[in-house]
Structure formats: structure tokens, C-alpha cells
Amino acid sequence: MNPENSETYINHPTWGLLYRICMVDENQDLFTTLYAQRLFFLVANDVNDIKGIKFQPIGRTEARMMLENRLRTLRRTGQSQEYDQLQSVFQRTFQ
């Protein structure tokens, strides 16, 4: 979808505007509701599927674990700018 340092928003049919927290893997990103940041979604962009984008609701604990895994990956690969940005998002969202 987009690099770590760009802001991405997507419209969910029920929950409205979602904010992209981070990439999970090549075709999946972690999103949360824009204002409350209480509902989390794993969003898959499947170009082979007619529907295109799939929203999978996930719990707060699972979202936190995904974000922690992404932070570990960024730290391990030496991507310090992206790590610092995501660490800030982590603290605002989960602390």
C-alpha cells in the first residue's frame, strides 16, 4: 500500500474513516478508527479478488502484538526513522 511515513485513510462502510497505523506484511495493513482508536482492522488489499479490499476486525490485544512485531522488525533492520514514528503511534494508541 504505502510507505511507513505516509498517512493513509480509508473509508469503512460501517465505521467510517479509518487511520492506517502500520504495514503488517506486503498486502496487509493495520488500521484503527480515526477518533476513538478503539476498533482495529486488518485490511488486506487483494488485487485478485473482485471486492478488492477486505476488512477483518481484530481485538486490541492482537493489534498491539502486530504493532510490537512491526517495531521489532524495524529495529532489527535499522530503519530508525520509521521505528521512531511507529513508537510514537504505539505510545499514543496503547499507553
Image (cartoon, rainbow, N blue to C red):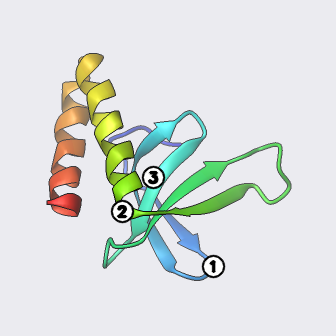
Seen from the viewer's position, the closer of residues 92 and 4 is 92
Judge whether 48 appears above or below 19 on screen: above
Determine whether, in the image, residue 18 is placed left or right of residue 44.
Answer: left
For mark 1, what is the residue? 13
Question: Which mark is drawn over residue 30?
Answer: 3
The residue lying furthest to the right in this view is 50
For numbered disc 3, what is the local secondary structure?
Answer: strand
Question: Which mark is drawn over residue 60?
Answer: 2
Nearer the observer, disc 3 or disc 2?
Answer: 2
Mark found first going from the N terminus, 2 or 1: 1
Mark found first going from the N terminus, 3 or 2: 3
Judge whether 32 appears above or below 89 on screen: below
Quarter of the rendering containing residue 75: top left
The crowd level at tag 2 (other Cα within 10 Å; few <14, some 14-19, many 20+) is some
Please name the amino acid that badge 2 sits on.
Answer: Arg
Determine whether, in the image, residue 86 is placed left or right of residue 66.
Answer: left
Question: Which mark is drawn over residue 91?
Answer: none
- The residues tagged by marks 2 and 1 sit, at their Cα atoms, a distance apart of 20 Å
Seen from the viewer's position, the closer of residues 48 and 40 is 40
The crowd level at tag 3 (other Cα within 10 Å; few <14, some 14-19, many 20+) is many
